[in-house]
Image: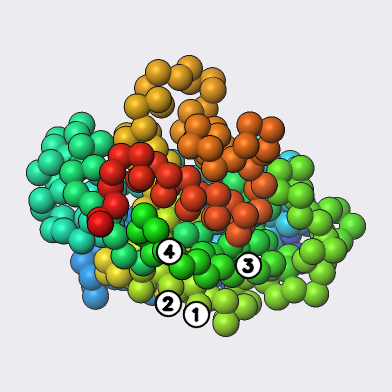
Amino acid sequence: MNLSQAIEHANTLVFPAFLTDDLARTAEREKNEEAIGLLTAAWMDAPAGAEPYPFDLVRGLADRNRELCDLIGEQRLRDLRGTSLAQHLSDDDLVRSAAALQHRDVAEVRRTAGPGLRDMGVAYVESTVSGMVAGVDIETTSRYPDRGYIINVGLQFVRLAPKGRARTGYAAYCGIPNLYADKGVPLANIHQITWKDLDGKQSFRENATLQRALLMAFETFPYLAHNAAFEDSWFMLHLNGYAESRKAGRIVPVDTRDICRRIDPEVRTLPHDAKPAALETWARRRKTLKANEKERHLGLDDVDLMIRTVEAEFAERNMFAE
């Protein structure tokens, strides 16, 4: 599939419910997901203001693909690799995030980080951090954002400072199609969210108030997430206006997992199978989670744990401005 074919495919009117054959559904899903990848990459690479189509075209195709995946069944798709989830933020994103936390020039951070970000750990601790940030965590029904739904959002605002920080937290549940009332909420074994939590709730894509609030928050403050590439990938296809603001540089995601990997010296001495950069493991080392406690895997709880752990790490490295 080339770009012209991807655009044509996205503009073709297809009703997923009319595809009753398993082979037809699989073929359509594969075309959808290939087109989503091509369209996203081409749109992001195009000069600002010269994009060949609005990003709504991509979000619309992702919405259509989710309907199709509902018919195929989440269980059948769970082990199939997708392409809509980024594995990590780009080097440019990491440099911009450090510059945002430290309120200094991106070029200055880049000079310190060096080629391939080999000294990014130095760049993170070279200057103090301060100011307001937003922490965010989402729970979803799938690993891939063009197949599943956002069902829980946790958002917390905090001022980075050694003492006297103010917290404001917000949590929301988001609905999913009624067919899951009988099937059960996918990935409930991880997030423990049941149909009772979601029954009667607006879906994330339909909740205009929630969408506006999140977009405003992300455009106003850098946002922190543990493995921020996950949230970034989901918001690209679920949050109206996010891709446009992200491309324009108005949104700065900060990956706390990358911060952990680069500035916590214990990460390099612990075995890989201990998952030393996982939030739960990191939090135990910084004593923001007790040895007998586990990460909740629920939006606001995980945001609060992440923020407290990041702050403990920053304090350990003397990174706060006085």
> Is 147 positioned to the left or the right of 119 in the image?
right
Image depth: mark 3 or mark 4 in front: 4
In the rendered image, which residue does mark 3 sit on?
171
SS at mark 1 in the image: helix
Q: Residues within 10 Å of mark 2 (few under 14, many from 20)?
A: some
In the rendered image, which residue does mark 1 sit on?
212
Q: Amino acid at mark 2?
A: Met
Query: Is residue 249 visible in this depiction of the protein?
Result: yes
Up/down of 202 relative to 266, above or below? below
Q: Are marks 2 and 4 in contact (CB under 8 Å)?
A: no
Q: Earlier in the sequence, mark 2 or mark 3?
A: 3
In the rendered image, which residue does mark 4 sit on?
165
Image depth: mark 3 or mark 1 in front: 3
Residue 71 in the image, given as x and y percentages of width and height:
76, 56
Q: CA distance from mark 2 to mark 4?
A: 21 Å
Image depth: mark 2 or mark 3 in front: 3
Q: Earlier in the sequence, mark 3 or mark 1?
A: 3
Q: CA distance from mark 4 to mark 1?
A: 26 Å
